Structures are given as structure tokens and as C-alpha cells.
Amino acid sequence: MDPSLPFIDLHRHLDGNVRLQTILDLGRQHNIRLPGATLETLRPHVQVTEVMPDLITWLNKLHWMIAVLGDYDACRRIARENVEDAKAEGIDYLELRFSPYFMAGPNRLDPAKVVEAVVAGVEEGRVQTGLKVQLIGILSRTFGAAACRIELEALLTQRAHLVALDLAGDERNYPAELFTEHFKRGRDAGWAITVHAGEAGGAASVWAALEKLGATRIGHGIRAIDDPKLLDHLGAHRIGLEINLTSNVQTNTVPGFAAHPMKQFLARGLLATINTDDPVISAIDLRHEFEVAAPAAGLTPAEIAQAQRNALEIAFLTAAEKTALVNTRKQRS
């Protein structure tokens, strides 16, 4: 990691990054019976301890993080704590994403009020820490197109407080073509577009995210390595790749760090970056991804620094904001 470059995380799910202690606290507060009453007995139900068979099995680890969201204060709390934790990691700029429909589900909250609470919590964290944070709204494809229309309406109530729209969830069974209308509305609202693709699905899923939804960044994009024409397209059009090394191994998207295509992406000049995905579930932080996972994937210090520069290039920031971020980092290094 180059200390003169900004330390950036572009792909972090706030609803997949809830402190274990907070789960315990909220469980007690809302009389929700948890599978463990202490940090250590709760941990195996929330954190990944071995490679999962697939993405959907891995996603089941999210259950207790949202099960304890008994009211809007709980949603605001976990949003604020995400910012606090990122600041404690030494992160300079963070893009947090969340699915209000997913968060609202277990306790039948109003998705629009969940969005309002998350926006408020992130703002509290930003004021408290000084960390620059931007929010990305997720449509959870797993619930289907109709539910995603409800989710989109909820996100649009706070349109000015979000920078981008994302699609996440069951990539294999809910293809991008089901959500073209949703993403046209998102683009019309002025949002950038980033889409989970090429994780559980193949290279065709990445093509669909680009051509059907208008994505300028791809979450994961691992299976792009299978299609040379797609790799050429990603390079020619400067499409960013939000890579999550440990997550990709844990979800069995790749069979191990040595098999990860990140090094090949960088060798081709693609805008591949290093991110965390769901830090609490994976039991990692961004520094771990740079200092442990990246070398395990064969990345040299120069390649890791290139991933940092790529993150700055594809961040949803203005040119002036990027310059300010670089200058601030240089002053501290």
C-alpha cells in the first residue's frame, strides 16, 4: 500500500457490516432471540469460518444483522457505526451501499423511512469523524422486479443524498433484463450506476449490466476473465471493477487467492480496485485486504499501488474532490 495515495473503499455493504456487539445490543433491546448471547457464541452465526459452497449460502450470514433492526433508530445506529469504523481503519474515502427493502423486511419497517434513517446516521458519522462518505442505494434483485420498484421509490425520496444505484442479490435467477426500467429511472434521477455482475453469473451477466442497465462500474466482475472481448471492452471504456478478494474466495467465486484474476486484470490495464464487501461477515478490514489478501493473490507492491490509483479514478467524485483527497493524504503521509 502506498501511504501517499488515498486509502479508499468503494464496495462496502453497511447492512453486511454490523458490529457483533451491536447485534447483541439490538437483540436485547428489541427482545429478539439470538443464536448466541456473547460475542464468541454469536460469531459463528454471523462470520464466515470456512469457504461457503456458493454466494447464496454466504449471504445467509446476513440474517442476524438485519433481524435486529427493530426500528429506525437501529438503522441509523448501524449507519453511523459504519462511518466510525471506517474512520478507525484509516480510510480516507468510503462509498457505502445498502438495500432498504432488505433492511426493512424482518421487522416490517417502511423502506422509505429506512433510507431516511441511513442518510441521517451516515451524516452523524460524517460530522463526528470528518470522513468523506457517499451512499449507494441497492435494489435487491432476489425479491423480484415488483419489490425493487418499491425499493427504488424509497431510495428516490432521498435522491440528493445518494450518488449511485446498484443491483445486488441472486444474480443467476434474476438477470439484469428484469430491471431495465428501474435503472433508466435511476439514470434519469442523476445517479451513477454500478451493478453486481460476474460473481455468481458469467461474463454474459457483465455484458447485460453494461448494455441493459448502463453500468459504468461493476461489482466483482470476476467472470469477465472468461471473455477476451469483454476484457477489451472494459479497458476501452474505462469501466471500473470493484474487486473483493477475501469475499470472492469465501463465496467460492474463485477456488483460492492464487486463482483470482485480479493480477490479470491489472496486467491488462483494467481499472480493478481492492475493497472489502462485508467486513464483519468476512472478519477482515480494508488494511487486511491490502496487506494480506492482495499479496496472497500475487499482487506486487506496484500493482497494489495501481489498484489504489484506480480507486481514485473510478470513485464517484468530482475532479476537484479527487484533488482535495490526494492533497489531504499527502499532507498526512
Image (cartoon, grey):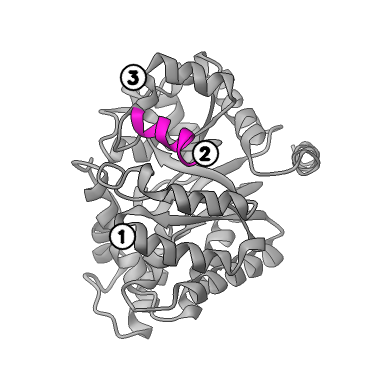
Residue 94 at x, y percent in the picture: 60, 49
Nearer the observer, 226 or 15: 226
Q: Which mark is residue 143?
A: 1
Residue position for label 3: 226
Side of 95 where 152 appears, left or right: left
| Dot 3 amino acid type | Asp
User: In this rendering, is residue 26 above or below 274?
Assistant: below
Disc 1/disc 3 C-alpha distance (Å): 29 Å
Labelled pair 2, 3 in contact (Cβ < 8 Å)? no
Q: Is residue 210 magenta?
A: yes
Image quadrant in which you'd find residue 99: bottom left
Residue 51 at x, y percent in the picture: 23, 40
Q: Which residue corresponds to the image point at 35% horizontal and 62% vertical from the top-left?
A: 146
Q: Residues within 10 Å of mark 2 (few under 14, many from 20)?
A: many
User: In this rendering, is residue 164 above or below 51?
Assistant: below
Nearer the observer, 112 or 65: 112
Side of 7 where 58 appears, left or right: left
In the structure shown, which secondary structural element does the residue marked by tag 3 occupy? helix
